[in-house]
Image (cartoon, rainbow, N blue to C red):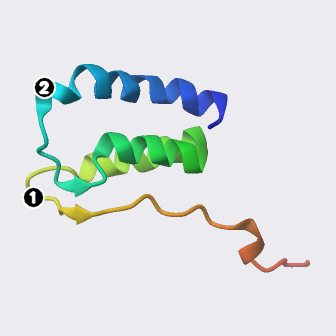
């Protein structure tokens, strides 16, 4: 995890220790939003990981979906063909 991603993960870690035990297990998605945020920050770094976590939290509402929603794998830079001008 990059240093910036670690700093951004501190509020998520605090939520998991302080508030999560009182909220209970009412998560619509698997993994939970906090686990999703931590994994997104680890896999994608601070900027994209934060964006993915915000999008996930935005989908977590009574009219939203539910079920298994894993963090997408990072796109491989070698998967795109080299374009020469």
Q: Is residue 85 above or below residue 75?
A: below
Disc 2 is placed on an element classified as helix
Residue at figure coordinates x 50%, y 28% from the top left: 8
Residue at figure coordinates x 16%, y 59% from the top left: 64
On-image quarter of the N terminus: top right
Report how far apart the C-alphas of labels 1 and 2 lie in the structure.
23 Å
Residue farthest left in this picture: 62
Quarter assignment of residue 57? top left
Q: Is residue 84 above or below residue 41?
A: below
Q: Where is residue 62 in the image (x, y as percent from the top left)?
A: 8, 53
Nearest to N terminus: mark 1 or mark 2:
2
Q: Which mark is residue 63?
A: 1
Q: Which mark is residue 41?
A: none
Q: Mark 2 points at which residue?
A: 22
- Crowd class of label 2 (few under 14; some 14 to 19; many from 20; radius 10 Å): few
On-image quarter of the C terminus: bottom right
Residue farthest right in this picture: 85
Quarter assignment of residue 29? bottom left
């Amino acid at each position: 995890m990059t240093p910036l991603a670690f700093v951004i993960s501190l509020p998520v870690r605090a939520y998991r220790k302080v508030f999560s035990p009182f909220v209970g297990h009412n998560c619509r998605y698997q993994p939970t939003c906090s686990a999703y945020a931590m994994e997104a920050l680890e896999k994608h770094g601070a900027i994209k990981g934060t964006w993915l976590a915000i999008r996930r939290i935005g989908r977590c509402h009574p009219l939203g979906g539910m079920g298994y929603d894993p963090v997408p794998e990072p796109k491989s830079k070698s998967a795109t063909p080299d374009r020469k001008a």
